[in-house]
Amino acid sequence: MNVRELYQVMLVSIISVLVIVLLSFKLYILIIPILLFSLYLAIETRIPDVKDAKTFYEYVRKVYGRNFVAMLRKKFNIIEGDNLAAFFPSTIKDNTIVISGDNLILKFNSNVVILSKYEGIDYLVNIIKKEFQQK
């Protein structure tokens, strides 16, 4: 468990204690900090929508951690494109990720795979885990 997760657990416990105190002593003024802490927690833990390379790396960092982001940056080139890249795979270099709409087009070892965005990211992370375990 990293520091960020501990911080989120701490916020949840603070919110819980404030709710218990609010209900026990009928201190309705505590509704304000409860709402503010809840709003902050919701914003902090929100998973970004993958639209481009920046949000792709942000999503991978939040879901899988910084180690996978570093490995992805070393091994794969990310570009934004359209679905035509899937029909013309020779235009894509090896170890390339194409983000297009709701699809993720992966080309590695001369193989082209078209998956939905989040399914493609999971598939990519599994590939990296397998490569790392082989070494």
Image (cartoon, grey):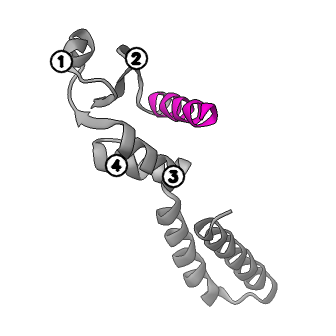
Residue that numbered label 3 is attached to: 67
**Res 122 visible:** yes
Q: Residue furthest right?
A: 24
- Measuring 77% from the left and 80% from the top, which residue is drawn there? 23
- Give the secondary structure at mark 4: helix
Amino acid type, mark 3: Asn
Amino acid type, mark 1: Thr
Q: Of the two numbered discs 3 and 2 on the same chain, state the one appearing first in sequence.
A: 3
Location of the C terminus (image quadrant): top right
Measuring from the top left, give residue 30's x and y in whole percent.
63, 86
Front label number (3 vs 2): 3
How far separated are the C-alphas under marks 2 and 1? 14 Å
Q: Quadrant of residue 25?
A: bottom right
**Rendered position, 68 above or below 9:** above
Which numbered tag is attached to residue 113? 2
Amino acid type, mark 2: Val
- Give the secondary structure at mark 2: strand
Quick check: is 18 in the magenta stretch? no
- Measuring 38% from the left and 38% from the top, which residue is drawn there? 75
**Rendered position, 49 above or below 105:** below
Amino acid type, mark 4: Thr
How far separated are the C-alphas under marks 2 and 4? 21 Å
How far separated are the C-alphas under marks 1 and 4? 24 Å
Bounds of the magenta segment: 120-135
Measuring from the top left, give residue 97's x and y in whole percent.
32, 30
Residue that numbered label 1 is attached to: 91
Residue that numbered label 4 is attached to: 55
Q: Is the magenta stretch mostly helix, strand or loop?
A: helix
Front label number (2 vs 1): 1
Local crowd size for mark 4, using a 10 Å CA cut-off: few (<14), some (14–19), many (≥20): some
- Give the secondary structure at mark 1: helix
Q: Of the two numbered discs 1 and 4 on the same chain, state the one appearing first in sequence.
A: 4
